[in-house]
Image (spheres, coloured by chain):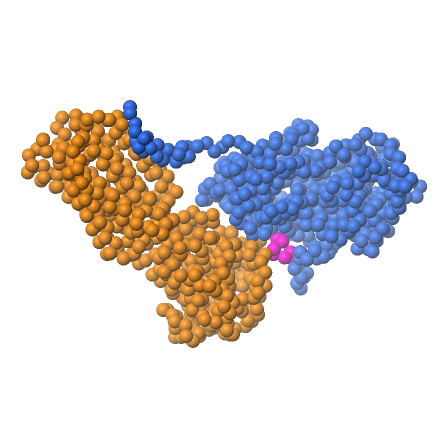
Chain colours: A orange, B blue
């Protein structure tokens, strides 16, 4: 059998795998650490340098060339194959992510660097030098081209980063196992052992490939346009952070919570009108929901605030600034402010069972009412319980979904607040990644719609000119003439409105 | 093959993960727990018909003795106290009052051992409305005078879901997969129900209303009691399997009887008595984690000082003037000489306890038949995992279509506690089992626990791992059985008459086991005593 042509196929696959690992590392690091130019530059540099180191080290391999070659391939399969899952887990759990990242890149680069010289030496007796160099390097570069085309077009969108990595690990291992047959006459001993090793590695990679659902499901990888850089199934919900061209986005159970590109619009509109509505010096602030810390960032701009109580169900949410440092930067490390006191509890149960001195401003920032457990947080019962935590002149604001996409739902929340005895002024603004988005400002005392942000508060979005206009509804979002049901615990009318309205937009 | 240590390590790296991936976690294990109450052995000593000599020093005098601290007895005591009448003793065989409305205290919430809700009464039921007002369960009355319970006490949505062929669906009636025939029959059934809701007899009485005493005794209505609900459905052409299941579930749920045993009158009573007018929704349910234990607790707060727990009335002897009540207390006999007695125990016990009853029965006590149930409270460390994204979420009442049980009620639901530990109250009426009562008392805790868990396991594969405790209550005589030819046979009316100085008060007298009936008869007996 002429093995040279088949070994060139080997070179081709090795080249593809090597470049894929490099691209994976570059992609992950630029998502996670930001600044893709720097990250890709450093990754490529490290990788090429490591390849050089590997090539240099090849001179110290003298005996059993074929055995070493297969072993190196298996090593690449393990380190490269598991690289993305390991980096994914490291990122979520370790602070020295960069060390692990560059370590892995270096090891892969070095191993890949070892491969080509070893292979050339194995083939040197079968081809003349001119032919050998020309063929090996040609296949190497073709492989690189194929990898760089397939990676962004096919693999990452279809399989996601973790599965792509594991898939190429398996391909690598398969090539190595195949190599034990191709190079059989050259393999000195331990052929069976090599094959057993190969099989074990293959099985482990396959198990990891199947179990990759624990990290991100196949559905998620194809669902999210951008790449998933953090995912966690907390006790309460599926948390996913993605990174794309326009920045970071947070999803809970598949629903977008914010996009770093325009979240300031949402959070400024959520927080500042309520502070302008409260007449006195706001000292005590209650935040229900808002575990991303972005509303906190806006609240902390008010120097008069002495105490901020945040109640969010999920400790994995309130700790996410630590788990994903980029989000900590986005919220200006708002959880580190000594005025902030975090309680992880269901706000409904908290309101029902915990005593607290009254608050001046209450910011209610729950996910949209798409299930009954969330629906209860928008009921008359909930707003009646809240009355025990506020004063007559306290200002309350509630995020109330989109008045355009879910008009009845939006006005149902306003009607529910009214039924619970609040004076209500609904308003809205535009948040491009959400659409037209609504809020309800409420107080137990009558109040006027605010007209400006308080003196000395820096904003990126809201100014005096536009704040009054937020309270003027165009015809397609104004209060409908038909009667609106009040959302109560015993009817959960809002969840039914919401399901009906948003279902229209599902594919 | 020669393997070095390093090679061995490489080979086995990751093996535990591979094994964990295929480990069988279904190994059966029973959580701890115990049988709670009922004092079957103690109760059965009554059957021996012994005579009892009370030592002279152990006699005391009371104006009124109430035998039984279930809802009827407690309601009577509450009424007497409301009328300023204090010289009362309530005798209770069990160590806790409440009868089938008892509840338990637990973490994170309390839980019921039996009855667990009360439909909001009509305004006409003034006594019951007064009780609910006293308990601050109702909103202040608006101009229309309509009765509205406070939001936090009204059963929170989602109220019900049903498990069928591996999936959970909204509601109790199985809509999923219903054929056109099923739908037509369902509508026709409700047309029939609405006809009976609108029925008024010559005296203007409704066919079905609570309490039963206010229902029409018109022959057209009472004729329904002569056939079973199953026969009635058949006669009306209702053969839809899921409609019949729905009606069967209603019978098992409210009466512990199968469709084929329940009187058609009782079947329709279930569907008609809590609807104001045709087309209206059924009256909403008042519920709290401890279920109807909240009424027991309220009554105990009002009249607790008169209740004597672990007092078993072994002999109730009418005398020329008054009644002598002999009780077994801690192995000692004690006597109370009462002017009048309210007998608020189940009617079938009257011949055993009341001297002279057997010799000249004032009514046929054996016509009052009861069925056996068990109730299990299953403490979970966390919520069962949802299997399919389309599954309807955990509701208050969770019913399994293909199960002899009634499913379970989630104790934390009403408090809005949607995450973490909870308690499920699992109900099992033993209407399909032969010799149900004997079977029930021959089963020990582990066997009953196995029944619950293997039943629930079909819907919740992780139920065994999640269960931290499972306690069981065996109700030997849980509910009066409204079989055909019972409710309108005349025996209830006879038993509602006093026997010498003994006044009967029990939900049995209504023919259906409901809070409203027990309450009504408790009040009626108290009023008769005072008259």
A246 above or below A187?
A: below
In the image, B273 versus B414, the foreground residue is B414
User: Can residue B32 be found in the magenta stretch?
Assistant: no
Question: Who's the residue at 70% across and 42% down the image?
Answer: B100
Which of the 4 image quadrants contains residue B132? bottom right
In the image, A44 versus A56, the foreground residue is A56
User: Can residue B150 be found in the magenta stretch?
Assistant: yes
Question: Who's the residue at 69% across and 28% down the image?
Answer: B438
Q: Is residue B173 visible?
A: no
Indicate the position of residue A305 as horizontal and vertical percent values: 48, 69
Which of the 4 image quadrants contains residue A420? bottom right
In the image, B221 versus B257, the foreground residue is B257
Question: Who's the residue at 65% across and 30% down the image?
Answer: B443
Indicate the position of residue B261 as horizontal and vertical percent values: 67, 33
Indicate the position of residue A293 as horizontal and vertical percent values: 43, 60
Indicate the position of residue B390 as horizontal and vertical percent values: 46, 44
In the image, A146: left or right of B219? left
Q: Report the span colored magenta.
A: B148-154
Quarter in which the N terminus of chain A is drawn: top left
Question: Who's the residue at 27% across and 41% down the image?
Answer: A80
């Amino acid at each position: 059998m002429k093995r040279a042509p088949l070994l060139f196929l080997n070179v081709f696959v090795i080249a593809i795998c090597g470049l894929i690992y490099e691209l994976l590392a570059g992609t992950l690091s630029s998502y996670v650490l930001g600044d893709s130019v720097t990250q890709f530059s450093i990754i490529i540099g490290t990788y090429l340098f490591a390849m050089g180191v590997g090539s240099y080290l090849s001179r110290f391999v003298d005996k059993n060339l074929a055995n070493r070659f297969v072993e190196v391939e298996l090593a690449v399969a393990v380190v490269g194959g598991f690289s993305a899952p390991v980096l994914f887990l490291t990122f979520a759990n370790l602070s020295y992510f960069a060390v692990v990242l560059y370590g892995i890149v270096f090891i892969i680069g070095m191993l890949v660097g070892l491969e080509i010289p070893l292979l050339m030496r194995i083939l040197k007796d079968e081809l003349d030098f001119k032919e050998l160099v020309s063929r090996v390097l040609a296949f190497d570069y073709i492989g690189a081209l194929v990898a760089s085309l397939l990676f962004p077009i096919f693999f990452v969108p279809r399989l996601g980063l973790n599965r792509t990595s594991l898939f190429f690990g398996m391909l690598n291992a398969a090539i190595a196992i195949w190599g034990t047959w191709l190079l059989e006459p050259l393999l000195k001993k331990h052929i069976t052992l090599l094959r057993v090793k190969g099989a074990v590695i293959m099985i482990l990679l396959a198990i990891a490939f199947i179990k990759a659902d624990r990290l991100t499901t196949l559905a998620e990888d194809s669902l999210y346009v951008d790449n998933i850089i953090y995912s966690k199934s907390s006790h309460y919900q599926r948390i996913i952070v993605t990174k794309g061209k326009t920045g970071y986005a947070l999803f809970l159970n598949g629903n977008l919570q914010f996009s770093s590109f325009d979240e300031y619009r949402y959070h400024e509109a959520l927080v500042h009108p309520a502070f302008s509505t409260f007449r006195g010096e706001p000292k005590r602030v209650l935040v229900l929901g808002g575990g991303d810390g972005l509303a906190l960032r806006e609240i902390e701009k008010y120097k008069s605030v002495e105490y901020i109580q945040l109640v969010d169900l999920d400790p994995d949410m309130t700790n996410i600034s630590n788990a994903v440092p980029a989000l900590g930067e986005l919220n200006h490390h708002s959880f580190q402010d000594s005025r902030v006191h975090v309680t992880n509890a269901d706000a409904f149960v908290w309101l029902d069972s915990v005593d607290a001195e009254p608050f001046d401003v209450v910011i209610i920032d729950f996910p949209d009412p798409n299930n009954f457990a969330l629906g209860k947080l928008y009921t008359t019962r909930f707003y009646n319980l809240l009355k025990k935590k506020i004063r007559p002149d306290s200002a309350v604001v509630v995020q109330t979904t989109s008045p355009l996409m879910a008009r009845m739902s939006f006005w149902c929340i306003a009607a529910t607040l009214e039924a619970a005895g609040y004076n209500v002024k609904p308003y809205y603004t535009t948040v491009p990644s959400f659409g037209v988005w609504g809020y309800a400002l409420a107080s137990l005392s009558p109040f006027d719609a605010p007209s400006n942000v308080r003196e000395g508060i820096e904003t990126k979005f809201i100014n005096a000119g536009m704040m009054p206009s937020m309270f003027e509804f165009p015809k397609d979002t104004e209060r409908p003439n038909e009667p609106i049901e009040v959302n109560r615990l015993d009817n959960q009318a809002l969840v039914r409105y919401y399901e009906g309205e948003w279902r229209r937009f599902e594919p | 093959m020669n393997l070095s240590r390093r090679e061995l390590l490489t080979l086995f790296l990751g093996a535990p993960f591979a094994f964990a991936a295929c480990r069988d976690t279904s190994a059966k294990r029973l959580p701890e727990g115990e049988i709670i109450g009922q004092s079957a052995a103690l109760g059965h000593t009554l059957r021996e018909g012994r005579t009892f000599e009370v030592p002279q020093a152990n006699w005391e005098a009371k104006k009124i003795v109430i035998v039984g601290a279930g809802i009827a007895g407690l309601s009577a005591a509450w009424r007497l106290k409301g009328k300023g009448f204090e010289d009362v003793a309530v005798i209770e065989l069990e160590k806790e009052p409440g009868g089938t409305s008892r509840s338990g205290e637990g973490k994170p919430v309390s839980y019921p051992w039996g009855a667990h809700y009360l439909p909001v009464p009509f305004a006409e039921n003034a006594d019951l409305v007064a009780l609910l007002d006293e308990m601050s369960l109702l909103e202040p009355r608006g101009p229309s005078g309509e009765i509205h319970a406070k939001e936090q006490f009204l059963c929170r949505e989602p109220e019900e879901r049903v498990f069928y062929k591996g999936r959970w669906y909204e509601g109790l009636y199985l809509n999923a997969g219903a054929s056109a025939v099923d739908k037509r029959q369902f509508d026709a059934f409700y047309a029939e129900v609405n006809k009976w809701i609108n029925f008024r007899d010559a005296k203007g009485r409704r066919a079905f209303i609570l309490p039963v005493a206010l229902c029409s005794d018109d022959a057209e209505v009472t004729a329904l009691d002569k056939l079973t609900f199953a026969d009635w459905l058949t006669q009306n052409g209702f053969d839809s399997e899921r409609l019949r299941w729905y009606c069967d579930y209603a019978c098992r749920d409210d009466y512990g009887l199968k469709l084929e045993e329940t009187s058609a009158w009782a079947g329709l009573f279930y569907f008609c008595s809590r609807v104001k007018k045709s087309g209206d929704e059924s009256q909403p349910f008042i519920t709290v984690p401890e279920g109807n234990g909240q009424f027991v607790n309220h009554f105990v707060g009002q009249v607790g000082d008169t209740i004597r727990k672990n007092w078993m009335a072994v002999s109730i002897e009418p005398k020329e003037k008054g009644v002598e009540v002999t009780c077994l207390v801690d192995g000692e006999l004690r006597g109370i000489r009462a002017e009048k007695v309210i007998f608020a125990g189940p009617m079938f016990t009257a011949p055993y306890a009341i001297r002279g009853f057997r010799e000249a029965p004032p009514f046929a006590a054996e016509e009052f038949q009861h069925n056996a149930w068990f109730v299990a409270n299953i403490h979970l460390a966390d919520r069962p995992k949802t299997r399919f994204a389309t599954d309807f979420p955990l509701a208050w009442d969770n019913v399994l279509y293909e199960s002899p049980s009634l499913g379970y009620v989630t104790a934390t639901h009403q408090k809005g506690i949607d995450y973490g530990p909870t308690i499920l109250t699992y109900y099992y009426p033993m209407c399909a089992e032969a010799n149900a009562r004997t079977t029930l008392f021959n089963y020990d805790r582990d066997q009953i626990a196995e029944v619950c868990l293997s039943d629930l396991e079909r819907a919740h594969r992780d139920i065994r791992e999640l269960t931290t405790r499972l306690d069981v209550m065996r109700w030997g005589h849980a509910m009066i059985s409204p079989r055909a030819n019972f409710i309108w046979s005349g025996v209830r009316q006879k038993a509602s008459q006093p026997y010498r100085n003994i006044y009967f008060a029990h939900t049995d007298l209504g023919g259906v086991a409901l809070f409203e009936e027990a309450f009504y008869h408790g009040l009626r007996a108290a009023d008769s005593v005072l008259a």
